[in-house]
Structure formats: C-alpha cells, structure tokens
Amino acid sequence: MTNEESELLYTNPYWRILIYGALIFAALLFLLPLYVMFTTSFKTLSEIRLGNMLSLPQAFTIQPWIDAWGEACIGLTCKGISGYFKNSILMVVPAVAISTILGAFNGYILTKWTFPGHKLVFGLMLFGCFIPFQVVLIPSALILGKMGIANSVFGLIFIHVTYGIGFTTLFFRNYYYVFPTELIKAAMIDGAGFFRIFFRILLPSSGPIIVVTVIWQFTNIWNDFLFGVSFTSGAQVPITVALNNLANSSTGVKEYNVHMAAAILAAAPTLIVYILAGKYFVRGLMAGSIKG
Amino acid sequence: MSFLEVKNLVKTFGSTEVLKGINLNLAEGKFLVLVGPSGCGKSTLLNLIAGLNNITAGEILINDKVVNNIHPGKRNIAMVFQSYALYPNMTVGKNISFGLEIRKVSKEQVQVKTLEVAKMLQIDHLLDRKPAQLSGGQRQRVAMGRALVRDPDLFLFDEPLSNLDAKLRVDMRTEIKKLHQTLKATIVYVTHDQIEALTLADYVAVMYGGEIQQFGSPHDIYNQPDNLFVANFMGSPSMNFIDGTIQKDANNLIIVIKENGRTIQLPITLPNTAIGNYVDKKVILGLRPEGINLFRDDSDDEKMGVDCKIEVIEPTGADTYAVLSFNNEEILARMRPERAIDLKETEKFTFNMNKAVFFDPETEQRIG
C-alpha cells in the first residue's frame, strides 16, 4: 500500500473503536441463535427445563446428536433423520449435476452456436427463473403423476432440474458471452467439433462459474421445503421436511436438544459447501458481473 | 492454374450486403493481401474462405474443389487470428499440437513436428508455459506455430500484427515474409495497414464497400491505381490530387491548372492515348509527394517548374516533406533533408509529370 492510500483510509481512532464496537455487537447478535442452537444441543432435557437459554451446558452430552441422527421419532418411525439426510443427498447431487451440465450446454449454444430466435429462447428461460413456486405446484404434480415419478426422489430431481435450468443457463450464458469467439473459430479450424470444443476449450476455462452455479443450485435445492412437502411424503421426504415433521411430532415431550442437533445437521452441508468454495463464489460472481 | 478461386461471392447479413460479388484467383505459393479500411468486407471474405460463415451466393474453390459446404476443419487450412486465439487452458506445446491430435497423428509424430515448428519460430524453450505467461510477440509466434505445424494447403492471416507495438510489428513482418519464401506456402492475409500490404504481397486486393477496387501487384497498385479510392488509400503520405483541364498545345497535350489567379501549364509526357479524348475536359491530376521536388536549376526542365508557397516543413528523418499551399488546398512535396535548409517562403518546385496519373472526375476511374 502506498502512503497516499493509507492516508485516505485514515480515520480518527475513536471513530474506529465506535465502528468496530457496533460491528462486533451486530455480529454477536446475529450469531446468538447459532450459539443457542449449539449449546442447547449439548444439554440434557432437565437442564433445558431450567430455562437458562444462554448458559453453557453443565452436564455435557452428545446423546441428543446420536438421537437426532439415528433414534428420534418422526411420525411413527424412530430412526432419526439419517434416512432423510440420505434422501436429500440422493436428490441434491444428481439435481445439481444435471442442471449445471444442462446450463453449461445451454450457455454454450446460446452464445457460440446461435440460431434464429435464440434471444427469445433465452428470454423465456429467464422468465422461468421468476415464476413463483406456488404457481407451478399443481401442474407439476399432474405431470409427475403422469410420468409415474410422484412421491419419489426422481420426481424431486426432475422438478429441481427443470426449475434450475433457467438460473444455470443465465449464469453460463453470461460467462460464455464474453468468452472470445475467435477461440471457438480457431478450434473449428483445428478440426474440433461441437463437443470437443465444449469439453476441451470452454469447460476447462469455466471453473469460477461452475463453482457459482454449484453453490447456488446446491443451496437452493438442499434448502427447498415447498417442493419436498408437496410432492413427497412418508419415508421419501427430504431433510427439510423431515426436520419440520420431527419438530412437530406431537407424541411425548418436546426434545429441544434433539431438534437443535437435527437442525444443525440439516444445515451443515450448505454451510460446508459455502465455507469450502465461498471464496470462488464471490470471485465467480464478480467475474460474471464485471465482464458481462 | 489457380489454387484458390473465388467466384461471384456474395454475403449478406440480414438486409446489408457485405460482399457484392467478389472474384479472385490465386496461384499456388503466392501471397495475397486483402487491404481496405474497416468495414470494407475483407475480414468477412477471409472468414468465408475459412468456412466460419455461410456463403450467401457464389463459390469458393480450394485446389479445384468447391468447399462451400465443407467444415472449416476439413478444408486443410490454418488461420492466425488478430487476438492470437490461444487456448488459455493449454500449454504452448498443446496449443500447437491440438490440431494434429484431433487429426489422430501418432504421438511421436506430434512431438517431432511440434518441436520442429517451435525451433523454427524460436519458441522451443516456452513449450511448457501457458499463454498468459507469454509476451505479445511470443503469443504471436505460438499462433503462427499452431498454423505451421499442420502443413496446410492454405494459410489465412487475419490482421495478425495489429496487436503488436510498432517495432515488433516491423520485425514480425520481415519474418512472415521470410517464412513465406522458405515454405512457398499459399497465403491470404488481411490487413488495414497499406504498408504491410505493399511489403508482403505478391498480389494486393484493395477492397472498399464490399467490392474489390483493384487487384494487382504492389507495384501496379502503387503506380497505376485504378481509381481515386485506391490512389488515396494506398501510399503514405497519400497522393496529391489537383484539378485541371486538358488542352492541346500545337501537337502536344498539356494540362492547364488555374491556381489563385495564375495559370499553370504542365506538359503530359507519358504516352497516353485515352487522355486525348479529354481535350477541353476537366480531369484530376494525381501526383505522389515524391513526384513533387525542389527545383534544380542545373538539371530540371523549366516547363515543369512552379512557384509554390511553403506552409510547413515536416522532417521525418530520411525525407523531409513540405506542405505547399495550392489552390487553397494543401499538397505535399518530398525533398532530401539536406536541401530543405534555408528555404524561402516561396520556392520553385518541379512537378515530375513522368509519375503523373489522371482520373476522370465523374467516374473517379483512372484515364488510360
């Protein structure tokens, strides 16, 4: 940093203290629920009943986590959330992969192999991004029923892929829009065809936008509740719906410590994805926005 | 026998006609430069020859085979782009060998050929680097290497030097010419730089408004421009144009120029029968700056001498140019730097009519 820059950034130390103080206070306030979730999940039920929400666990226990994963009752089955966690994984991995690949192909075609009317097609896809979920629920249910994949992970994958294509296409289209067309021409003259150009030239240069798309799709699909609750039931529901069912199970006492542990487990994958790839996420978004 | 043949080629984008019936013939091993201002259709023509755009009408033949509907990868051509278009994710070596790989050349063969080309272009020490780590000149060489390695029938160059700085551009220009001489390759080269066109080409096609204005050797293009556009576009500084009237003086033809109240008469020295039809008609006299020099008392013909007012002197090192005021317009004269000392406000200049060309002011075509 040059002298001039540091001068510009200079502020009165008292102001600094005030600013940082306010920021730290706000950060703590926002972290408070997470803190309560964590501490509660390690407490025994009797300790929770004492009502000291903010206190640290006196008798530290990991039993609530074990229960939440494998023994808590949801509806009539008492096998914890592990099965539903698996449902979500089985749903989210293919759904993210398929929608990302299709988005990449769409972006490639809409920018480098344009055809008459390609702008209209892209416009309609964008339109698809902004249709509210509720509007498509009944038609989707009908179609899933006709296809024979209602109440199954395949049905959810199909719905999420369909709904995601609009966004993934938008991401890749904007990224490829600024990708030099001369490179495509050079590869054509080198003798490469449609797929080879895509896999050898375009895709290896698409790292940042793939990360953005994967995080975006993963978070949205994993966190989805509406499609899950509408199109699946019983043992087929994804983790978000299972969590709701767990917390709403009316039999016996409310095991808050188990609920908290389950909630953290349900939120963990998106958190992990964001922590691991968040750096690229911001970078990728910037790359798209500035150049596009 | 022509190696590349373009017949009545038309290209339209929507309702705009970008190429309006292009005809070209190029023999094997010859260097053709397409030159013209931006928007003249030269790059479009090159893209059509490469097969990167569809032809609206007409035919393109390479080696006597119509290639209209053949994929660019199967035309056995290579192209060097203005932006170099190196694949950013591949090393220099991979960039060069990508085309060979696709054509299923054996691994050993690919290696031998890549190294051979890299050595020829002096980039063999860079083979493991990525394009982002190279300088502009090095990228340029890699782009050429990618074209050379495939040993194609036809090389296409799309303004390959315009992204380089001035000095490097001149060096690479010489190198491309040397390469052409050793390889005897057939080349079509697009540029907007008329000096590049004149130095490199066996044939120059000057394009403007989607048409070829003139096709010929650099010498013909420079000395016998077919029309006012070519005369004006080719050559730097450009040609002087002076209005005048042809008249008959005894048995000789002269051109009469009215300038600021005086009348200048210059003899027409070149044998030109067509100009005989223009007696008493207006013409445009075209004379390049090197055709207007400071008058020498001892050797110059008195008839060619004209007094001119000097506006500005512009030394360029090798030559010095004088901007002369003539008919309220500026014309340029060239002289040797050592003679451009102690010039008076008005000097006598000689108009070398052996280098003159004449144009019809209405059709803008050269007379004769």
Image (spheres, coloured by chain):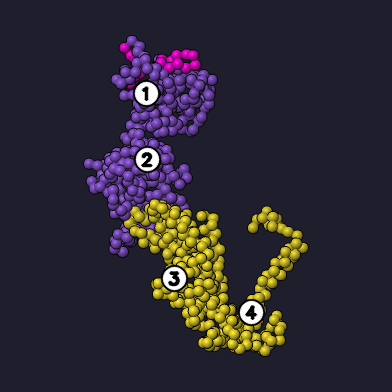
CB under 8 Å between discs 1 and 2 = no
Which residue, given by chain and number where applicable, does mark 3 sit on?
A142
Q: Disc 1 vs disc 3: which is toward the camera? A: 3
Q: Nearer the viewer, residue A179 or B215?
A: A179
Instruction: Name the residue: 45% across, 31% down.
Output: B237
Residue A195 at x, y = what percent? 36, 61
Residue A145 at x, y = what percent? 42, 73
Instruction: Name the residue: 47% across, 13% down.
Output: B262
**Quadrant where the C terminus of chain B is found in the figure:** top left
Q: Let me know if residue A283 appears in the view.
A: yes
Give the colour of chain A. Answer: yellow
Q: Main secondary structure of the magenta part?
A: strand
- Tell me the crowding category of disc 4: few under 14, some 14 to 19, or many 20 or more residues within 10 angstroms, Cα based: many
Give the structural element (helix, strand or loop) at label 1.
loop
Instruction: Name the residue: 44% across, 75% down.
Output: A150
Badge 4 amino acid: Met
Work out how far the residue at label 2 is from the one at label 3, CA to CA, in angstroms. Answer: 51 Å
Which residue, given by chain and number where applicable, does mark 4 sit on?
A37
In the image, the segment drawn in magenta is B251-271
Which residue, given by chain and number where applicable, does mark 2 sit on?
B17
Q: Disc 3 vs disc 4: which is toward the camera? A: 3
Mark sitting earlier along the chain (3/4): 4
Q: Picture quarter containing residue B268?
A: top left
Q: Is residue B268 magenta?
A: yes
Work out how far the residue at label 1 is from the one at label 3, CA to CA, in angstroms. Answer: 79 Å
Give the structural element (helix, strand or loop) at label 3.
helix
- Tell me the crowding category of disc 2: few under 14, some 14 to 19, or many 20 or more residues within 10 angstroms, Cα based: some
Q: Chain of mark 3?
A: A
Q: Picture quarter containing residue B210?
A: top left
Above or below residue B191? Residue B366 is: above
